Amino acid sequence: MHTMWFNIFLNKSRCLATFSKLHEYIVYKSDDNVIPMRGTHLGEFEELVLLAVAALNDNAYAVVVKSEIEEKADRKVNISAIHTALYRLEEKGFLESSVGGATKTRGGKSKRFFKVTAYGFKSLREAQSLRQSFWSVIPQLSTQE
């Protein structure tokens, strides 16, 4: 993926910030931190994918993410939907990826491993907090144990 960055300089020697148009998302970059500035809504399926990647820790690639969601959510998922969500979450800054070594059992193909970024964990905590704030004000549900 080719990304063009636009620099904003405080003076001639120090870069204050860098901006980029990454697909439809505006990204702000400063001191090696990449922070999506808009287009960062976390949908329900994206949240499930992000949770699965977090739960799988260092072993999160598309096939096991799919299995994790199917097992935990008791929901059938298409592998193409998983791939789309993983790449979209990476574009939004919630995930980062790296390519693992090729294996003979995979016909020489390598796996792309994903891990949740600090921004991704922050977004998961915010989603959890938002949901909890709604649960706590529903009288029929907040008093049940």
Image (spheres, rainbow, N blue to C red):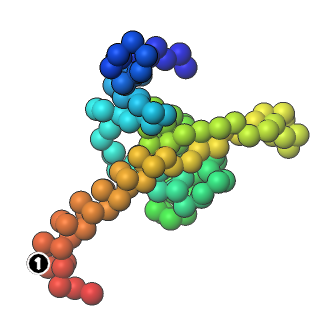
Which residue shows up at 36% across the image and 24% down it? Answer: 16
Question: How many numbered discs sit on the rendered protein?
Answer: 1
Q: Is residue 42 above or below residue 139?
A: above
Q: Amino acid at mark 1?
A: Pro
Looking at the image, residue 60 sits to the left or right of residue 89; the answer is: right
Towards the viewer: 10 or 135: 10
> Could you tell me if residue 105 is visible in this image?
yes
Q: Is residue 57 above or below residue 46?
A: below
Mark 1 residue element: helix
| Residue 38 x %, y % | 28, 32
Write down the quadrant of residue 113 in the picture.
Answer: top right
**The N terminus is located in which quarter?**
top right
> Could you tell me if residue 77 is visible in this image?
no
Q: Which residue does the numbered mark 1 point to in the structure image?
A: 139
Which residue shows up at 35% across the image and 16% down it? Answer: 11
| Residue 15 x %, y % | 41, 21
| Residue 117 x %, y % | 49, 46
Q: Is residue 26 above or below residue 97?
A: above
Looking at the image, residue 125 sits to the left or right of residue 136; the answer is: right
* Residue neighbourhood size for the residue with mark 1, other residues' Cα within 10 Å, grouped as few (<14), some (14–19), many (≥20): few
Towards the viewer: 10 or 5: 10
Write down the quadrant of residue 89 in the picture.
Answer: top left
Which residue shows up at 44% across the image and 43% down it? Answer: 94
**The C terminus is located in which quarter?**
bottom left
| Residue 132 x %, y % | 25, 68
Write down the quadrant of residue 124 in the picture.
Answer: bottom left
Which residue shows up at 69% across the image and 36% down it? Answer: 99
